[in-house]
Image (tube, helix red, strand yellow):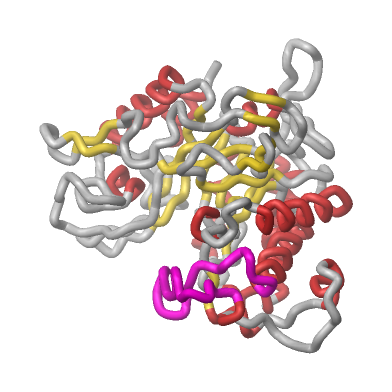
Amino acid sequence: MISCIYTCLLLCLFSGPACIHNNTGQPKYHFNGKISEHVLRNYLSRSICFEQLCTPPPVPSKEHDEAYRDDLRLIQSIGAKFIGRSLSCRGEEDKLNDPEFLSFAKNIIDEIHAFDRDILFQAAISDAVSSKVEHIQIPERVFEAFGLPVKDRSFNYQAMLHSSGLYKDWWGEECSVPDITKMESKLWLYFLATNYIDAGFEGIHWGQVTLMAHDDPKLEHLSALLGMIRSYARTNARRRFILNDAHAPGGGYLVNGRHLFDFNSSHLCIKARTMVPMGGALAEGYLDAIYNRSRGGISPSGWSCKSLPYLVAFDDSGISSDSCRPVNECCIWGYNEISWFSLKNEEEQEAWLEYAFNWIKKTDPNGYLQMPVACKVTDAKSSRRWYKANILSPASPNGSGLEVRIKELWSP
C-alpha cells in the first residue's frame, strides 16, 4: 500500500491548473466516450516510456520510496501526460492472484489523478503468455461475457497456443505467443484488459498483434475482442474509453477502412552508421520502420485521417553483446535500441535525442517520439538493468539527467 507520505508529496508537486487549454477554450486533454484527433495528438506529444511505475516493489524500502518520489517530481517537471508501459505482468501472470498487485497500481493512479486528472496511464498486455496463467482462476464474469457456461477452472495455457506449434516457446521455455483465434486466448486477454480498466488504466499496449493474429487474416477475431473490451470500457472506464495501440509493421490494422487501434506504434528502427563508432541514424524504409507508412482510414472514435498518428519508442528486446557488430536484424551494434542509447555519455544522449525528435517531426508529422524515462536495459558488460532519465541525485543514483533535455524539447 502506498504510504500517506505520497499524498503530502503530491500536494506539493501537482499544484496549479489541472490542464492546459487551447485557443478555443477547450481542455487540451479532455475526452469522454471517444477521443478527438487533436486531443490524441496532444497526448502522444507528451508521452514517456515509464516501465513498472505502477508495479509493487519486491520488497518495500526507504530507497524505493525516495526513488518513487523523485519519479513523481520528474513527471510533474517535464509535463508528461501519457505514462506508457507503466504496468505489465508478462511472464509473471500469477502476480494477479496477489490483491496488492493491481491495488498498488490503482492507488498510484488515483493519487496522481487527485492533482492532475489529465494524466493517462497505459498498461501492457503484449504478445506473450506463460504457463503461469494456469494459477489463475477464471471469474464467472469472463465466461458470462462470452456467453459460455460457468466452470470452476483455471486458465489453460496449452489451449491458447497455435495448433501448428507456431511461436511455441517463442519467448522462452513455456512462454509463447497466444493465438487470438482460440477461445482460451480471448478469455485471458479479455480478463487482463478488463482488470486493467478497473484499476484505472486508460490505455493498453497490445504488442506485436501480427504474431497473435497470424491465423486471423481478416482480423475478425481481433476486431470482435477489441469490440468487447471497448464495450466494457464504455461502462467501466474512468472516461468511458480505452486507448488501444499495437505495433504496426504493415502500417495499421483495418477492417473495411476502419482502424481497430486508436494509434499505431513502432520501434525506432535505428540504422547503424558504420563510419561512426556506435553511431546510429533514422531512415525511411529501413527494416519495418513506420515513417510515412502509417495508413489512413477511420479511427475508432469516428474521425478520418490520411495517416493514423503513431508513437515510436526505443525497442528493449533482442540480444545484447559486447561484440559491437554494427548490423543485426533487431539490434544496433550488438544491442537493443535502448541499451545502445544508454551506453552513450550524457552529452551524446542529449544530442541524439534532439536529433531523433527533430528528424521525426520533419520527416513525418504524424509520428511522435516516446521519451525514454525508465526502461529496462541489457548490458553484457555490466550488471545494470535500468535506464533512468532522472537528474542524478541520492534518490536516483543512476540517473542520466536526460529529463532536462526532454523538458526543453517539449517547451513551446
Q: Is residue 170 left or right of residue 349?
A: right
Viewer-closest of 386 and 166 = 166
Q: Is residue 193 above or below residue 358?
A: below
Q: Is residue 78 left or right of residue 108?
A: left
In the rendered image, the residue lying farthest to the bottom is: 152
Q: Residue at x 53, y 72 (%)?
A: 162
Q: Is residue 199 above or below residue 255?
A: below
Q: Is residue 269 above or below residue 171?
A: above
Q: Residue 46: within the magenta?
A: no
Q: Is residue 347 left or right of residue 20?
A: left
Q: Residue 176: within the magenta?
A: yes
Residue 216 shows up from this direction: yes
Q: Residue 29: where, in percent of width, then height? A: 73, 30
Q: Quadrant of the N terminus?
A: bottom right
Question: Which region of the structure is painted magenta?
Answer: 160-184
Q: Quadrant of the C terminus?
A: top right
Residue 7 shows up from this direction: no
In the rendered image, the residue lying farthest to the left is: 275
Q: Residue at x 59, y 58 (%)?
A: 216
Q: Residue 264: where, in percent of width, then height? A: 56, 39
Q: Residue 196: where, in percent of width, then height? A: 71, 59
Viewer-closest of 377 and 130 = 130
Viewer-closest of 109 and 16 = 109
Viewer-closest of 169 and 14 = 169
Q: In which quadrant of the rendered view does residue 263 lie?
A: top right
Q: What's the magenta bit mostly, secondary-structure-wise?
A: loop
Q: Is residue 298 above or below residue 67?
A: above
Number of disc labels? 0
Q: Residue at x 13, y 33 (%)?
A: 276
Q: Residue at x 66, y 55 (%)?
A: 222
Q: Residue 260: where, in percent of width, then height? A: 67, 44
Q: Is residue 336 left or right of residue 242?
A: left
